[in-house]
Image (cartoon, rainbow, N blue to C red):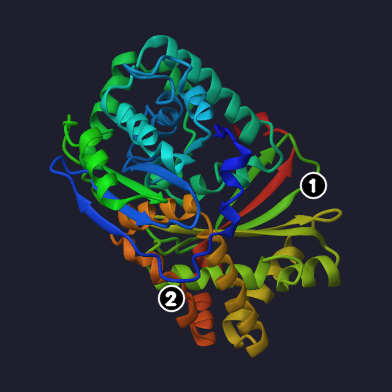
C-alpha cells in the first residue's frame, strides 16, 4: 500500500544511522494491556511511531476474507478528531511520512516525523485506536481502492500469482488459513455489511491486542508520559486475540498444479514446500539455502540453468517464515519450448547436490558476509528497527531476538545446510506448478 509522503530534509540524516552494535530498548505494559517498546537513538533528529496489531489474514473467517488488509486502508479514512481525507495532509504538513502493511499474521501502521513532532505521531495513532470513523462512504471508497490494488498487483501483473502467492499457497495449505490470500476476496468484501466492519474493528483494534513502538530521537521519560496521556485511558472492547493453532497435514506425496497468467508470454516451472515457522532455526538455514540455489546471478541454479544449459531466462525464489509455518518457493522462467521433465531433473540435481555434498568453505564465508550485510541494512534506519522490534515481540514472543538473529545465522554450519535440505526439500514434500501463459481453459474451471 503506497501511502508514503516524503519530506526530503527529514531523511538527510537517516543514512548516517547504523545498528552494527546492540539495539538497546525498554519495554513495558500499560494497565489496559498495550505493550510498549522504546528505543532511544539520538544520532539523528527523527522518530518513528509504529503500532502493530495482532490481526492478519489468518484471523478472518470463511466468507469474509480480506478484512485485515481492508482495514489497513480503511483506518486512514479519519477519526472523530481527524477529518476524512486529512490524515496524509497532517503528516505531510508536519514534515513526515507514513505507511502501513498487512501480512498473514499482523497489521502494522507507522509514521516517521522530525523528533519534535513525536506528540503528533502518538496522537494520530491513539486516534486510530480510540475512535476511528467507520461509515459507508469510507467503506465504499476503500473498496474501490482495494479492487484497484488487486488488479494492479495480481490480476494484471506478470507473475502476480507467484509474487503474491495467490497461485501457490492455495496448493500448499488445505487446512491452515495461510492457503488464503492476504488481499482476500472482492466478493466477500462486497457482501459485507457496515456493522461487520465495525465489529471487526471492535474485536481486534484494542490496546490489549497491540504493540506500540517508539524509536529514535526521544527522551524516554517524556515519551512515557505522553504515551500514558494518549493511550492509557483507551479501553478494550474485546479480549486479546487468542489464536487456536491450526495444524496443517504434511505433504507426503508430490502435488501437481497448473496456474494460468494472461499477462505473461514466458512460462515458469515452480517447486514449493511447507517449511518451519519463523522461530525455528531451520527457517534461518533455509534462508541460506535459498541464497545458495537462486540468490542472484552467482547462485547455483542461475549458473546452471541460465548460463550453462541456457534453459531458463531467470531463476527465482521466495523463502518466507511466518508465525505458524513457512514456505519456500523456487523456480525458473523457461527459455524456449518447455521440456518439463528435463527442467525438473535439472532443478532436482541442484537440490540433490546440496543434500549430499557440503558447500565449499568459500561459498560458506560468502553466505555469512551476505547475511551480515543484509542484517545491518535491515536495521540501519529507525523505521526498520521499529518494525523489527514490534515483529519480534508480537510474532516471536521476544523483542530481544533483534540482537540474536545475526548470531543464529552465524551459528549455522555447512552440515546444518545439508541436513535441512534433506529434511524439507524432497519431491514427496512439495507442490510442482506449471505456470502457463494465457487464460484457464473453460474445461478446467
The numbered dot on residue 408 is 2
In percent of the image, x 29 and y 27: which residue is there? 201
Callout 2: helix, strand or loop? helix
Q: Which residue is mark 1?
A: 266
Q: Residues within 10 Å of mark 1 (few under 14, many from 20)?
A: some
Numbered circle sitting on residue 445: none
Q: Nearer the viewer, mark 2 or mark 1?
A: 2
Under circle 1, the secondary element is loop
Q: Quadrant of residue 371?
A: bottom right
Q: Is residue 437 above or below residue 218?
A: above
Q: Is residue 65 left or right of residue 153?
A: left
Q: Residue furthest top?
A: 137
* Residue closest to the far left: 31
Q: Nearer the viewer, residue 115 or 209?
A: 115
From the viewer's perspective, is residue 293 above or below residue 361? Answer: above
For the C terminus, which image quadrant? top right
Q: Residue at x 45, y 60 (%)?
A: 251
**Quick one: 117 or 259, which is closer to the camera?**
117
Q: Is residue 246 visible?
A: no
Q: Quadrant of the N terminus?
A: top right
Q: Is residue 348 above or below residue 327?
A: below
Residue 401: x and y in percent read 36, 66
Front position in the image: 122 or 59: 122
| Left or right, residue 67 beside residue 339 | left
Q: Percent x, y for residue 336?
A: 86, 54
Q: Is residue 92 visible?
A: yes
Q: Position of residue 178 (x, y in %)?
A: 42, 47
Say whether marks 2 and 1 touch (CB < 8 Å). Answer: no
The image position of residue 72, as x and y in percent, is 43, 32
Q: Earlier in the sequence, mark 2 or mark 1?
A: 1
Q: Nearer the viewer, residue 436 or 382?
A: 382
Amino acid at each position: 500500500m503506497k501511502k508514503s509522503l516524503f519530506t526530503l530534509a527529514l531523511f538527510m540524516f537517516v543514512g548516517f544511522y547504523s545498528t552494527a552494535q546492540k539495539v538497546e530498548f525498554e519495554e513495558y505494559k500499560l494497565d489496559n494491556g498495550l505493550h510498549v517498546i522504546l528505543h532511544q537513538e539520538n544520532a539523528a533528529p527523527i522518530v518513528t511511531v509504529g503500532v502493530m496489531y495482532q490481526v492478519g489474514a489468518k484471523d478472518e473467517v470463511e466468507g469474509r476474507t480480506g478484512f485485515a488488509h481492508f482495514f489497513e486502508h480503511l483506518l486512514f479514512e479519519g477519526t472523530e478528531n481527524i477529518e476524512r481525507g486529512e490524515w496524509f495532509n497532517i503528516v505531510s504538513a508536519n514534515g513526515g511520512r507514513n505507511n502501513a502493511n498487512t501480512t498473514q499474521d499482523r497489521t502494522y501502521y507507522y509514521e516517521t516525523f522530525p523528533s519534535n513532532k513525536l506528540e503528533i505521531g502518538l496522537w494520530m495513532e491513539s486516534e486510530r485506536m480510540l475512535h476511528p470513523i467507520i461509515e459507508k462512504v469510507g467503506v465504499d471508497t476503500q473498496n474501490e481502492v482495494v479492487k484497484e490494488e488487486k488488479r494492479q498487483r495480481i490480476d494484471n501483473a506478470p507473475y502476480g500469482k507467484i509474487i503474491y502467492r495467490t497461485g501457490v499457497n492455495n496448493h500448499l495449505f488445505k487446512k491452515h488459513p495461510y492457503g488464503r490470500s492476504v488481499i482476500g476476496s472482492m466478493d466477500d468484501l462486497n457482501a459485507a455489511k457496515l456493522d461487520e466492519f465495525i465489529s471487526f474493528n471492535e474485536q481486534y483494534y484494542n490496546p490489549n491486542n497491540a504493540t506500540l513502538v517508539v524509536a529514535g530521537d526521544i527522551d524516554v521519560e517524556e515519551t512515557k508520559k505522553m504515551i500514558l496521556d494518549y493511550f492509557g485511558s483507551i479501553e478494550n472492547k474485546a479480549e486479546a486475540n487468542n489464536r487456536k493453532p491450526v495444524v496443517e497435514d504434511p505433504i507426503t506425496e508430490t502435488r501437481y498444479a497448473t496456474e494460468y497468467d494472461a499477462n505473461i508470454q514466458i512460462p515458469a516451472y515452480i517447486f514449493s514446500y511447507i517449511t518451519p515457522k519463523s522461530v525455528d532455526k531451520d527457517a534461518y538455514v533455509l534462508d541460506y539455502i535459498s541464497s545458495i540455489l537462486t540468490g542472484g546471478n552467482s547462485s547455483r541454479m542461475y549458473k546452471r540453468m541460465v548460463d550453462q544449459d541456457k534453459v531458463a531466462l531467470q531463476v527465482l525464489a521466495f523463502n518466507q517464515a511466518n508465525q505458524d509455518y513457512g514456505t519456500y518457493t523456487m523456480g525458473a522462467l523457461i527459455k524456449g519450448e518447455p521440456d518439463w521433465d528435463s527442467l525438473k531433473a535439472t532443478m532436482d540435481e541442484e537440490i540433490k547436490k546440496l543434500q549430499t555434498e557440503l558447500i565449499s568453505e568459500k561459498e560458506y564465508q560468502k553466505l555469512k558476509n551476505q547475511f551480515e550485510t543484509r542484517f545491518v541494512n535491515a536495521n540501519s534506519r529507525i523505521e526498520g528497527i521499529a518494525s523489527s522490534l514490534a515483529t519480534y515481540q508480537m510474532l516471536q514472543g521476544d523483542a530481544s531476538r533483534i540482537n540474536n538473529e545475526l548470531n543464529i545465522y552465524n551459528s549455522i554450519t555447512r552440515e546444518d545446510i545439508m541436513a535441512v535440505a534433506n529434511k524439507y526439500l524432497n519431491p514427496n514434500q512439495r507442490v510442482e506448478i506449471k505456470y502457463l501463459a494465457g487464460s484457464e481453459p473453460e474445461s478446467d474451471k
